[in-house]
């Protein structure tokens, strides 16, 4: 569906960046330049792009776009570079790789590839994975900053990640609880807000449980229930107490399809520890009044069907997996699983479209049947332990002494927690190589910096990150700008330098053809169009005459069936695997565990405010931070309640210090009652810009965060204590 004339054409494509949406972009090209980006105006439901997608031209043609290879001339982090040729750059990178391999061994090469291109089949971190694997190996990074708690819970409780509904099913719900979920800003999937607006018009009751009164709450919710960060599990368990006490649970569902409810019930009722987990018990923990908890519990158990919707934020806390396990348990108690308008509160992949291939793990989810050995290579370093591993190596318990850090598709200095520690770590290693599109804070630490092209400058295939009933062929829109190349091209050239036979035996088109042919194994919706038709159209929609919802088959049979892909064949409220794991902090049933850096931590005497870090509507993480149009959309500020600001004499708009033992920043204050007292919030992704004293002037929230993970491996970016003062 592209229209062509000699000097102007329109190409259908999408954004490959890391938000859950995959929306349509129509690129209008004239004389080899993108002059305008429009979006879907075709049949409903349209896949209409957001402000970020529509601003993409400002990143492609940005003044800070990297144009040619460079080598560092100043100190790491200083940002002083000099232009070199591709030949010299590739020679230097391959010589460094060889040297580190010979002197220290392959595990001394740490590769960090993160979320720059998510859902793409070809142009993503797997180019480097494959190269370094063929080169003899490397130390990889594991874990997901996004929703590890939810992934872990979904697999433990349901045995699968395919535990969601397509969002048109929002229209079937009588009650929708948006639990730490703000899809109007932190986009989960294209069109979520569109369906929420219709649900509201249809009369669904919508409730937001969030420390902040978000744009989603303002637009859709009947009620806002502010809650102290990291305490959601206590509220869910108290809701379970109400349901059990009033005998509102769907006992038939529990008996037929779940295992371990009685053990959970004994915990909730306090049979063993003598502490019934009543709303009165939860009130001082959560800050939510007991009668509000009771009312919400009754509403959720009696309004059928109802959806408890969340993505990752309440799980991005100290014991985050407990939140998702408890939410799924409550969904089972209400019998909201396997029915239209319900929701399992699992990872959320609906059973439609291209599914991740079983057994290949998260990192390879977009590479059908083609997982390079290196992706399974262990030992790997958890995303929160990267800096400690670099700083302390094997002596500190890391898997290797890291000498070279290779970074693509990410801005880890800015985006992984504890940025000041990250800077120390990146100053210490022998070699840093970065492939980037723009001069990010991480790029400033590179010894060799290689310019990468954007999605408009190459071909790819992409699926939405959390599934959905469509996929895009991203046809190349313009020629690569300046001297930029794709990661795949760079790796191909490096493979030649390193003498790795076989790396470059496939062209871009050859790979895409091969992947598309293999994509048949990723879906039940057949036939798929052939490759050339798909490429020509730019888009494929899988037919869907009603919402696709998880677990209809598993909940259709009787009590004797063991239809869930868990060890017991049931929804595991009690997990035998976790019992065997035998870790006190990872109990077999969902439990509330007091978090570190919560309000009862002794550290709260020094740093009394709990800080959360949210996903901003004007960026994708740190990506597009420097796009001028988007900067106008939302000035970067710390949200602070008027009571907390008043105590500190802080006026709206004034610059303040936000600090703890890990770091300090200067940022403007947004004094507002849209955040509950005792909590402050900073949008993640602003660029780290330390002054000569090491105080961050850029507002990078990760200077404050502890590089810790939950017992199951969740990224705890909503668990943090700080103090705020007038600057
Ligand atoms: N515009 C935009 N969209 C994005 C992204 C982006 O960077 N920009 N990133 C994408 C990615 S990779 C991801 S992982 C997702 C993230 O999606 P989410 O995790 O849903 O997004 P967040 O903004 O982190 O958090 C959502 C809400 O949870 C609240 N919250 C924080 N901590 C707690 C808590 O302890 N309890 C409760 N109840 N609420 C809490 C916040 O106030 C916020 O309003 O967003 C995706 N979409
Ligand atoms: N405090 C705090 N920290 C967080 C979060 C939080 O909520 N709070 N959220 C976390 C989450 S959920 C996530 S997913 C992570 C994201 O962490 P990152 O993946 O590090 O996030 P981005 O800032 O999007 O970095 C992607 C970079 O890839 C570059 N890029 C884009 N395309 C290409 C390409 O084709 N090749 C190459 N080589 N580079 C490319 C972009 O220019 C961009 O700089 O951040 C995490 N960090
Ligand atoms: Mo994420």
Image (cartoon, rainbow, N blue to C red):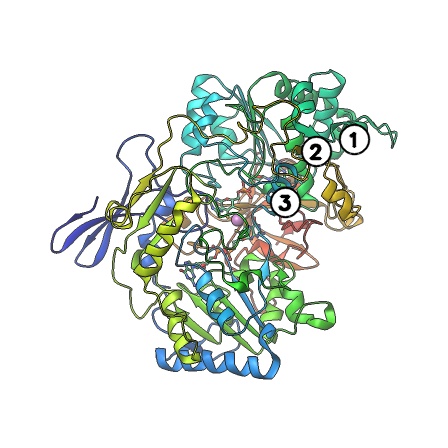
Q: Is residue 47 left or right of residue 178?
A: left
The Cα atoms of the two marked residues, 1 and 2, are separated by: 9 Å
Q: Residue furthest front?
A: 560
Q: Are marks 1 and 3 in contact (CB under 8 Å)?
A: no
On-image quarter of the C terminus? bottom right
Q: Is mark 2 within 8 Å of ligand 1?
A: no
Is residue 650 shown to the viewer in this render?
Answer: no
Mark before the other along the chain sequence, 1 or 3: 3
User: What residue is pinned by disc 1?
Assistant: 263
Residue located at (12% from left, 51% from top) = 5
SS class, disc 2: loop
Q: Are marks 1 and 2 in contact (CB under 8 Å)?
A: yes
Front in this rendered view, residue 651 or 443: 443
SS class, disc 3: helix
User: What residue is pinned by disc 3?
Assistant: 152
**Residue 485 spot, x, y in % from top left:** 34, 67
Where is residue 374, by image quadrant? bottom right
User: What residue is pinned by disc 2?
Assistant: 573
Residue located at (35% from left, 32% from top) = 543
Q: Is residue 2 left or right of residue 464?
A: left
**Image vertical order of residue 349 relative to residue 256, above or below:** below
**Image vertical order of residue 503 relative to residue 121, above or below:** below
Q: Are marks 3 and 2 in contact (CB under 8 Å)?
A: no
Mark before the other along the chain sequence, 3 or 2: 3
**Residue 606 spot, x, y in % from top left:** 76, 51
SS class, disc 1: helix
């Amino acid at each position: 569906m592209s229209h062509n004339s000699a000097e102007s054409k329109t190409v259908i494509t999408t954004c490959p960046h890391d938000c859950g949406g995959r929306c349509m972009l129509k690129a209008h090209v004239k004389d080899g330049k993108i002059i305008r980006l429009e979006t879907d105006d075709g049949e409903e439901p349209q896949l209409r792009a957001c402000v970020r997608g529509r601003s993409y031209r400002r990143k492609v043609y940005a003044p800070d776009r990297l144009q040619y290879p460079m080598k560092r001339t100043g100190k790491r982090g200083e940002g002083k570079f000099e232009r070199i040729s591709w030949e010299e750059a590739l020679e230097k990178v391959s010589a460094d790789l060889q040297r580190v391999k010979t002197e220290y061994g392959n595990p001394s090469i740490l590769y960090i590839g993160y979320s720059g291109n998510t859902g793409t089949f070809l142009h993503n971190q797997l180019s480097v994975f494959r190269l370094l694997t063929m080169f003899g190996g490397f130390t990889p990074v594991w874990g997901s900053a996004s929703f590890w708690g939810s992934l872990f819970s979904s697999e433990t409780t349901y045995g699968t990640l395919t535990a969601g509904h397509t969002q048109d099913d929002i229209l079937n719900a009588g009650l929708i609880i948006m639990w730490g979920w703000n899809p109007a800003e932190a986009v989960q999937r294209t069109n979520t807000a569109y369906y929420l607006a219709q649900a509201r018009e249809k009369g669904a009751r919508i409730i937001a449980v969030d420390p902040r009164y978000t744009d989603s709450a303002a637009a859709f919710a009947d009620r806002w229930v502010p809650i102290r960060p990291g305490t959601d599990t206590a509220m869910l368990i108290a809701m379970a107490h109400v349901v059990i006490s009033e005998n509102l649970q769907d006992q038939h569902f529990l008996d037929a399809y779940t295992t371990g409810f009685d053990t959970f019930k004994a915990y909730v009722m306090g049979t063993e520890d003598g502490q019934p987990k009543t709303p009165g018990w939860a009130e001082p923990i959560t800050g939510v009044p007991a009668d509000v908890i009771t009312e919400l519990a009754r509403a959720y158990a009696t309004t059928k069907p109802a959806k408890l919707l969340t993505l990752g934020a309440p799980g991005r806390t100290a014991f985050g997996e407990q939140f998702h396990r408890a939410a799924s348990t409550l969904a089972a108690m209400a019998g909201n699983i396997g029915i239209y308008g319900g929701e399992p509160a699992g990872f959320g992949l609906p059973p439609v479209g291209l599914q991740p291939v079983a057994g290949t793990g998260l990192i390879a989810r977009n590479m059908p049947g083609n997982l390079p050995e290196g992706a399974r290579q262990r030992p790997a370093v958890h995303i929160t332990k990267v800096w400690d591993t670099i700083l302390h190596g094997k002596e500190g318990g890391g898997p290797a002494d890291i000498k070279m850090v290779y970074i693509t598709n990410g801005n880890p200095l800015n985006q992984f927690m504890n940025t000041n520690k990250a800077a120390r770590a990146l100053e210490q290693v022998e070699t840093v190589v970065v492939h980037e599109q723009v001069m990010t804070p991480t790029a400033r630490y590179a010894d060799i910096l290689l310019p990468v092209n954007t999605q408009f400058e190459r071909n790819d295939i992409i699926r939405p990150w959390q599934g959905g009933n469509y996929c895009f062929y991203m046809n190349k829109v313009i020629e690569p700008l300046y001297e930029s190349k794709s990661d795949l091209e760079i790796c191909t050239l490096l493979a030649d330098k390193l003498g790795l036979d076989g790396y470059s035996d496939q062209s871009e088109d050859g790979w895409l053809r091969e992947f598309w042919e293999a994509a048949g194994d990723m879906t039940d919706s057949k036939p798929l169009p052939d490759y050339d038709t798909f490429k020509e159209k730019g888009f494929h929609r899988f037919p869907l005459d009603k919402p696709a919802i998880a677990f209809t088959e598993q909940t259709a049979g009787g009590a004797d069936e063991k239809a869930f892909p868990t060890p017991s064949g049931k929804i595991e409220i009690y997990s035998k695997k976790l019992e065997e794991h035998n870790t006190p902090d990872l109990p077999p049933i969902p439990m509330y565990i007091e978090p570190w850096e919560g309000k009862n931590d002794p550290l709260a005497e020094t740093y009394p405010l709990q800080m959360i870090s949210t996903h901003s509507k004007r960026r994708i993480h740190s990506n597009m931070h420097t796009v001028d149009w988007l900067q106008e959309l939302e000035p970067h500020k710390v949200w602070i309640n008027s009571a907390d600001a008043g105590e500190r004499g802080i006026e709206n708009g004034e610059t303040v210090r936000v600090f703890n033992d890990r770091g300090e920043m200067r940022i403007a204050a947004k004094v507002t009652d849209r955040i509950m007292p005792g909590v402050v919030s900073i949008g993640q992704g602003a660029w780290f810009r330390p002054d000569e004293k090491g105080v961050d002037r850029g507002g990078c929230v990760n200077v404050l965060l502890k590089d810790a993970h939950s017992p199951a491996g969740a990224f705890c970016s909503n668990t943090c204590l700080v103090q705020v003062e007038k600057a």
